[in-house]
Amino acid sequence: MIDQIDFGALQAHDPSTRAKLRRGVLETGFLKINNTPISKENVDALIKAYGAFFAQSNAEKSKVDMAATGSNRGWGASGSEQVDPMANPDYKEVFDCGFELGKDDPLRAEGLLVYGDNQWPTAPEGFQATVQEYYAGAITLCRALLGHIAEVAEREAGYFDSRFTRPMALLRGNYYPARPDWAGEKDFGIAAHTDYGCLTLLTGDGTAGLEVLGADGDWHAVDVAPGEFVINFGEMLEMWTGGRVKATLHRVVGSGAERISVPMFFNPNHDTDVSAEGAEPISAGAYLKRRYDETYVHLQGKG
């Protein structure tokens, strides 16, 4: 169902790889990719850092609790998100960090929550450096991927470049505990949803869990080994391209095994008009804020 492509071959404009990219972007909404500049060792170090953070007590993690802020930076406890209003809050934990404006950036005066300052825990040692190193590599890889996606989405080469100079890029560590004995049909690690933004780059610890809704109406497992990545596309990019790019439903039900996954949600500058041609304009920041307000329990009801 989901094609796997070699990043090196993509960069070399290999025709068969380009065909797989086109199919993933326009039809399935998902791809797997390997042979990227991000090494397995980088991913292993990242997973180890997140694992050490999530293994701490809730009292320790709550020192960087995002519920104490008006943004999505820091730790989110189990039940802090609800992606499907018809399901129960998701029982995973998360740690979010994102793009920070420079200290002298004039946008700071606007107090935009999508560019909120990150919260970093003091433990485990080296956590911030490890996460920030991966974040920088993921940003570079996402920018390269968008260049190829622009072409298959019938945009001119470099279309996205000027629109991602201050990307609303959110890196998340997800911790899914083993599925609880009490879990019922409305309980999920994360319920069925489409991602909100443009491009998602996902890696993880190799434990199965991700499921994608196929055109056949069935849920299909998608595994990703450390050092490999899953790519999928969000609502914003689907809207922005007039429906050419496909945002596909996916979920994590959970199993008897713990799991860590790490998505990078790569989204454009906050003031980018992401409306389809001829539609009422909407900025990326406004769209993302509305979806965050609908999802994060600590933001619901705050407008």
Image: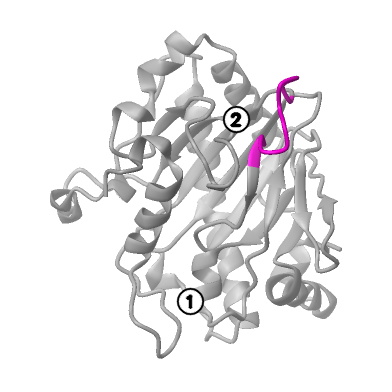
Q: Is 81 in front, or is 21? A: 81
Image location (x, y in percent) of residue 276: 45, 82
| Residue extent of the magenta highlight | 179-190
| Residue type marked 1 | Trp
Residue 30 against residue 19 in the figure, above or below = above
| Residue type marked 2 | Lys
Query: Which residue in the structure is indicated by mark 1?
Result: 240
Taking the spot 40% from the left edge, 90% from the top edge, the residue there is 278
Q: Is 12 in front, or is 296? A: 296
Image location (x, y in percent) of residue 90: 58, 35
Taking the spot 53% from the left edge, 70% from the top edge, the residue there is 237
User: For the residue carrying disc 1, how many other residues have a C-alpha within 10 Å: few (<14), some (14-19), or many (20+)?
Assistant: some
Q: Quadrant of residue 268?
A: bottom left
Q: Is 31 in front, or is 212? A: 212
Of marks 2 and 1, the one in the foreground: 2
User: For the residue carrying disc 2, how many other residues have a C-alpha within 10 Å: few (<14), some (14-19), or many (20+)?
Assistant: many
Query: Which residue in the structure is indicated by mark 2?
Result: 92
Left or right, 153 with reference to 156: right
Left or right, 185 with reference to 299: right
Whether residue 137 is visible to the viewer of this picture, yes or no, is yes
Disc 1 element: helix
Taking the spot 60% from the left edge, 33% from the top edge, the residue there is 174
Image location (x, y in percent) of residue 221: 83, 48
